[in-house]
Image (cartoon, grey):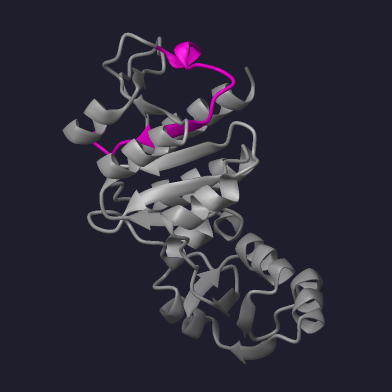
Amino acid sequence: MDIIFGTNTIMSSLKLGSVKKLYLVNGYNNEKVLSLAKKNNVNIVYVQKSELDKMTHGGVHQNVVGVVKNKELLSFSSLLKRLEGIKNPLLVMLDELSDPHNLGAILRSGDAFSINGIIFKSKNQVALTETVAKVSTGAINFIDCVQVVNLSQTIKELKKHGFWVIGLDGNSSSTLKDIPGDVPLCVVVGSEGFGISRLVKENCDMLVKIPMTGHVDCLNASVACSIALYQIRNR
């Protein structure tokens, strides 16, 4: 079982029926949360605020903490099966992302721009923690998440299924505008500070950068991903 917290995240999970138990601060009176909890027969326990602080390790819980089923990971083959019949699906691949806030933000952007799944490594990669769920504001519930052992091999399989694999790389001479249209796409986002690893980069069909005109020469991983997804979905 996983712990989630924060009003928006709890509301989203309640609507899906995935919340098994709620811990609320004494005197909690958010009628929308209480109504959804009652509708879904969710067990409610009232506690002191200090108890919620302990459960969330000091996170901003907004006086509500939920217990939900663990996020179910999809196999790569199952993801491919789900993509059958979808015109030009859009995926995101993460190459050793380490910050849970970045992963949560990418999930949120992924839901906003209707990606069809997110792929990440089973090792050297931030897991789907309660912090990730909180930052995603519930988006984690709507995106298929796939864990694989080897990203390079996964890229090769994606290519066999007609995907163009696009790596975000600030040193590239190509830009987002050069990404081909009307094809299945997988956008690769590198780790914070190190970018995309050499082997993954070599297996990408194209590397693109986000042109910038200010004094900073790089963007946060989740911000770069969000910009790329917006550009792809709105061209």
Q: Is residue 214 magenta?
A: no
Q: Residue at x 36, y 26 (%)?
A: 168
Residue at the spot 82% in from the left edge and 77% down from the top edge: 35
Q: Is residue 196 shown left or right of residue 186?
A: left
Does residue 208 appear left or right of residue 96 in this picture? right
Q: Quadrant of residue 100?
A: bottom left
Indicate the position of residue 22 as horizontal and vertical percent values.
62, 82
- Magenta-drawn stretch, dominant element (helix, strand or loop): loop
Q: Percent x, y for residue 29? A: 76, 77
Q: Which residues are magenta?
A: 175-196
**Is residue 194 visible from the viewing direction of this image?**
no
Image: 105 above or below 170: below
Res. 127 image quadrant: bottom left
Residue 190: in magenta span: yes
Query: Where 164 falls versus 91 (above or below)?
Result: above
Q: In the image, 58: left or right of 36?
A: left
Report x, y in % for residue 151: 29, 44
